[in-house]
Image (cartoon, grey):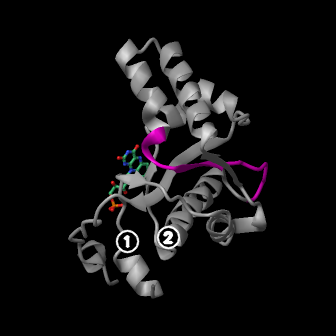
């Protein structure tokens, strides 16, 4: 796939099934993540990969978080099943580094770029996926289970797999509609 085609025809897709990227393909996805712009070379990122039984473990963490939030039983069950919507889920964490020069915001942006780069690297290899957050990305119990520092953030859960059907192409805006030529 050509680079511009990849960028201009990028679409998320949430109907995902096996096969997931292989170990080698996942390595490429992870390598793409760490090629993103990174002011001060702080490497403010950390990734947690969930596959197979680990997807169920993540579901348990989500369910515990929902229970702690006193969610209704049906929502607890829903939270438990969330990670099973794809054969591979990657949690992307902004691992915020102490710096007098590089603000936290820039480190969060870098971690966000990691998610986009990973999604693109997956699509380039024939997979599809969707970047999700949801309330559980901001949840104290989930953060504790992932061993985040107080200043860290979960910037997303990237769900990846093979599209169950043809991915609909969205009609996109023209970038110039949001642009002022000074
Ligand atoms: C930080 C962030 C969090 C997101 N969280 C969710 C989410 O929890 N659930 C969801 O359906 N889409 C979420 N999205 C949006 C999807 O990733 C996707 O961009 C959207 O469905 C539009 O599709 P497109 O990427 O093909 O334009 C999120 C996007 C971003 C950037």
Comparing 43 with 78, the one in front is 78
Relative to 158, is 167 above or below? below
Q: Is residue 127 left or right of residue 170?
A: right
Q: Is residue 42 left or right of residue 107?
A: right
Comparing 79 with 20, the one in front is 20
Checking the image for residue 126, the label placed there is: none
Name the residue that disc number 2 marks. 120
Q: Which percent across, then down, holds residue 173?
A: 23, 72
What's the CA distance linking mark 1 and mark 2?
8 Å
Q: Looking at this rendering, what residue extends furthest in the front direction?
A: 19
Residue depicted at 49% across the width and 76% down the height: 124
Residue depicted at 75% across the width and 59% down the height: 101
Q: Quadrant of the C terminus?
A: bottom left
Q: Which percent across, then down, holds residue 147?
A: 73, 34
Q: Looking at this rendering, what residue extends furthest in the left direction?
A: 171
Q: Residues within 10 Å of mark 2 (few under 14, many from 20)?
A: many
Q: Which percent across, then down, holds residue 168?
A: 24, 66
Relative to 48, is 1 above or below? below
Name the residue that disc number 1 marks. 10
Q: Residues within 10 Å of mark 1 (few under 14, many from 20)?
A: some
Relative to 171, is 6 above or below? below
Residue depicted at 71% across the width and 48% down the height: 95
Say which quarter of the image contains residue 179.
Answer: bottom left
Q: What is the number of callouts on the image? A: 2
Segment colored magenta? 84-101
Assess mark 1: CB under 8 A from ligand 1? yes
Asked if disc 1 and disc 2 are in contact, CB closer than 8 Å, the reply is yes
Residue 10 lies in the magenta-colored region: no
Say which quarter of the image contains residue 141.
Answer: top right
Relative to 6, is 105 above or below? above
Q: Which percent across, then down, holds residue 153?
A: 61, 42
């Amino acid at each position: 796939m050509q680079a511009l085609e990849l960028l201009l025809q990028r679409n998320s897709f949430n109907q995902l099934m096996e096969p997931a990227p292989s170990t080698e393909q996942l390595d490429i996805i992870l390598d793409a993540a760490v090629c993103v712009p990174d002011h001060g070379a702080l490497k403010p990122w950390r990734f947690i990969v969930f596959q197979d039984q680990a997807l169920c473990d993540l579901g348990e963490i989500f369910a515990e978080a929902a229970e702690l939030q006193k969610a209704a039983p049906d929502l607890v069950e829903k939270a438990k099943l969330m990670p099973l919507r794809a054969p591979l889920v990657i949690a992307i964490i902004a691992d915020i580094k102490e710096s007098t020069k590089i603000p936290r915001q820039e480190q969060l942006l870098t971690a966000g770029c990691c998610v986009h780069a990973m999604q693109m690297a997956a699509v380039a290899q024939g997979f599809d996926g969707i970047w999700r957050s949801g309330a559980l990305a901001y949840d104290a119990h989930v953060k504790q289970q992932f061993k985040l520092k107080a200043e860290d953030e979960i910037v997303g859960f990237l769900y990846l797999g093979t599209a169950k059907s043809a991915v609909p192409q969205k009609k996109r805006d023209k970038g110039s509609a949001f642009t002022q030529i000074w």
